Amino acid sequence: MRGLACVLMFQTHCYDSWLGGDARKSDFLMWSQLGGTLPAPLFLFLAGISFAFVTDKLLRKNVSAAEITRIMARRGGEIFAFGLLFRLQEFLIAWGWAPRSDLLRVDILNTIGLSIVLMALVSGAALKFANAARERAALITAAVSTMLLVILLTPLLWTTWAPSRMPWPLETYINGVHNIGAPQPWLFPVFPWTAFAFAGLAAGFVVFSDRGREHAALTLTSFAAGGAALILIAIGLDHSRIQLYPIYDYWHTSPNFFLARVGILCGIAFLCYAWCRWGLGARGFSPMIQLGQTSLLVYWVHIEFVYGRFSILPKRAVGIPRATLGLATIFLMMLALSLLKTRVDWKKLFAGFRAQVSPRAS
């Protein structure tokens, strides 16, 4: 799933950065941008699933709730720090024309880190008050409850309940106002984005339960069925005459759009499972799986070759065929980078190099 998220991210960024002229008004770009609504939810959803996987392993080793909270919160803090370093790198590379406010922009890495910290706190609290026989049920309940709380509060925190008296560097983590004074849909604040991580957390605890492990195909099939049901529910609620909020923004804050995307994520989870178990993903080398193993690295690097000073094509100046060729180039570059990261034993390589240099120096 991470590999798929990477590819969808590549195409979204490449076409957004490079297409110019009439191509920017085309249906092609519209569909590209629609596909671009999936990478961030996928990364957050998978962060929740990964969190559940690690937590399940720790629980099976009888690690205490306090220790689990500490371990996972520290991991979230590390990713949050990576997000800040990424913003600093982008600012330094764009020195001279990037505003200083870009240093405090809420990007996807920041939100993934904060989401992991919040999942650590919520899971720790759930484990502390649950008995041993009901730990996983308590964790799933806590994850779903937090998810619902986040998506139900989002429309209000973006509008009538906006904490506008807070300094914008803090408020932007709640509703993405940045320094503009109004929520910006291109940012990734806690509300609503963290809800995707908690959805993945609940899904992960189901998948990694004893029953989920024993009947993986049935569990993932039920995800697909449940996802389809969520999409139908979301469509029904969107067309309902009953509106809970004074301002309704389907594409940015609506709980209905969130439910639809979670439904799509559940369907993607099943398709990826089927691909890896029965499809080509189970046969030999898979570029998608390879990219997924180094998703943080390829995310970090590809930005510079698409949006940064080292963009391989002129920005907003090419047509669809040339941009597509550029996308293929980015894909192959990032795949090669991923292979270099995972397939080359750099410690052994440098050790051999030092062994060859040392005798010559002496």
Image: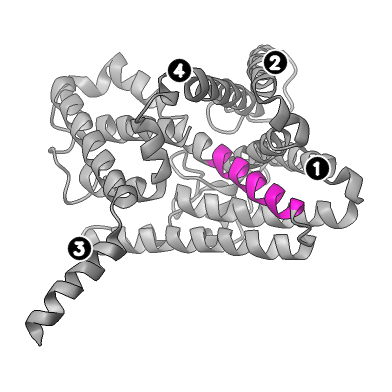
Task: Give the mark nearest the N terminus, 1 or 2.
Answer: 1
**Label 4 packing within 10 angstroms: few (<14), some (14-19), many (20+):** few
The residue pinned by badge 2 equals 233
In the image, the segment drawn in magenta is 44-60
Element class at badge 2: helix
Gap in Å between the C-alphas at discs 1 and 2? 27 Å
**Residue type highlighted by circle 3:** Gly
**Label 1 packing within 10 angstroms: few (<14), some (14-19), many (20+):** many
Coloured how? one colour
Q: Residue furthest front?
A: 359
Task: Please tell me which residue is depicted at 53% across the width and 23% down the height of the picture.
Answer: 268
Vertically, is 299 above or below 74? above
Image quarter hosting the C terminus: bottom left
Gap in Å between the C-alphas at discs 1 and 3? 52 Å
**Residue type highlighted by circle 2:** Ile
* In this rendering, position of residue 24 left or right of residue 55: left
Task: Please tell me which residue is depicted at 52% across the width and 23% down the height of the picture.
Answer: 277
Task: Give the mark nearest the N terminus, 4 or 1.
Answer: 1
Gap in Å between the C-alphas at discs 2 and 3? 49 Å
